[in-house]
Image (cartoon, rainbow, N blue to C red):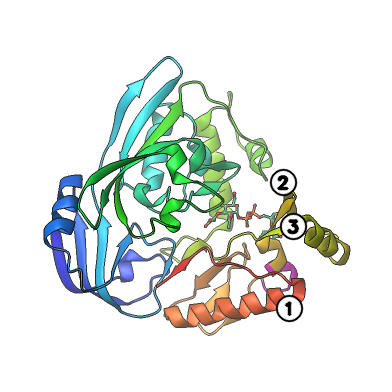
Amino acid sequence: MEILSNYSLKNYNTFGIDVVCKTFVSLQSQHEASDYVKNKLDRTLPYILIGEGSNLLFTKDFEGTTIQMQNKGFELIDENNKFVWIRAAAGEKWDDFVSWSVEKKYAGAENLSKIPGNVGAAPIQNIGAYGVEIAEIFNGLEAIEIETGKHRRFYLKELKFGYRNSIFKQTLKNKYIITAVMLKLNKFPFLKIDYGNIKSELETMAYENLNIAIIRQAIINIRSSKLPEPKELGNAGSFFKNPVVDKQKHSNLKKSFPDLVAYDLNNGFFKLAAGWMIDHAGLKGYSKGNVAIHKNQALIIVNQGGASGQEILEFSEEIQSKILEMFGVKLEREVSVI
Ligand code: EPU
């Protein structure tokens, strides 16, 4: 366990915002997490839990405690002739887990290649990409209750997964330190290549038999062509969620914007592609001061260097109001603002 004072979080958020927190705590094990919250956490101050900081926007110094789980390891905990159950430590990078599982030929996580962030943070917002969400391979998680230091296991149903949502963003927000995530992967892959341009990317690649390693490579190729590398250009992936509207609103919008990109959720609602809307509003590449809409993917806001969190927040509010004006739709942030 390491406890540091007045610590810069610049390297702990992918926007690269230079803010300072009063106390920074890194925890190496479940036992340390329990010991820390029972005996050392200053409960008179606010605290936040961070992973890799890939979904956070700091707008000011944080007068409290920042807690980060740094435990490591992947472990096979059970298997039968079809499935394997893996326990991944929360402090591992999500993509290291995907890379490990693809190497072992355990299938199910390959479409989630290259998503930034740590394993422990992945279920909180039900990370998803290229037709797959972590909910589909999630089996359970282990966590320490901050109020009591008690260990608890959560199962799939208790997570109440939704689109970029789970119980840890709702009633249990900030109540637990997630220490490990259990994933159920397949020994016999069920390849998912229907989403977006996976197929067209595969056509450009040379391979003999399609397998999960090839799919991982295709996803990496697509992501690197569109999504900026945080080390080069600070960003937190999609800044907004894709908004969900009802059938009526969707058909009204379709009349005014026949090219509108939307996915039928088959429950009377449609999910709109916010990236398309921002792009269609002529805002792709739009820049103000140190902040911009990324030139290749309009759902991503980038720090062009030296932007403050407040500047990024104000920029994002300007985008929200332009989209509201043009489409009558309020974009909700995917990124958490602190
Ligand atoms: N589009 C445009 N212009 C743009 C961006 C997108 O016209 O500048 C159109 C695309 O052509 C496509 C549609 O909008 O028809 C959707 O675009 P894309 O497939 O790139 O995905 P997205 O909806 O913008 C979501 C996730 C991403 C995930 C991708 C791929 C959200 C908020 N974002 O983006 O996740 O990687 O799908 O599955 O759901 C993240 O959450 O941080 C993230 C990057």
Question: In this orientation, which residue lies closer to the viewer: 310 or 139?
Answer: 139
Residue labelled with disc 3 = 246
Labels 3, 1: front one: 3
Mark 3 neighbour density, 10 Å: few (under 14) some (14–19) many (20 or more) = some
Q: Which mark is residue 325?
A: 1
Q: Quadrant of residue 315?
A: bottom right
Q: Which residues are magenta?
A: 278-283
Q: Which mark is residue 267?
A: 2
Q: Does mark 2 have its CB less than 8 Å from ligand 1?
A: no
Q: Does mark 1 have its CB less than 8 Å from ligand 1?
A: no
State the image coordinates of residue 250 (x, y, percent, origin top left).
79, 59
In terms of image quarters, where does ligand 1 lie? Answer: bottom right
Q: Quadrant of the C terminus?
A: bottom left
The CA distance from mark 2 to mark 1 is 27 Å
The residue most toward the left is: 39
Q: Residue at x 37, y 62 (%)?
A: 53
Q: Looking at numbered disc 1 in the image, what kind of residue is underneath it? A: Glu
Label 3 or label 1, whichever comes before in sequence order: 3
The answer to whether residue 210 is seen in the rendering is yes
The residue most toward the top is: 81
Q: Quadrant of residue 309?
A: bottom left
Dot 1 falls on a residue whose secondary structure is: helix
Mark 1 neighbour density, 10 Å: few (under 14) some (14–19) many (20 or more) = few
- Is residue 83 within the magenta segment? no
Q: Looking at numbered disc 3 in the image, what kind of residue is underneath it? A: Asp
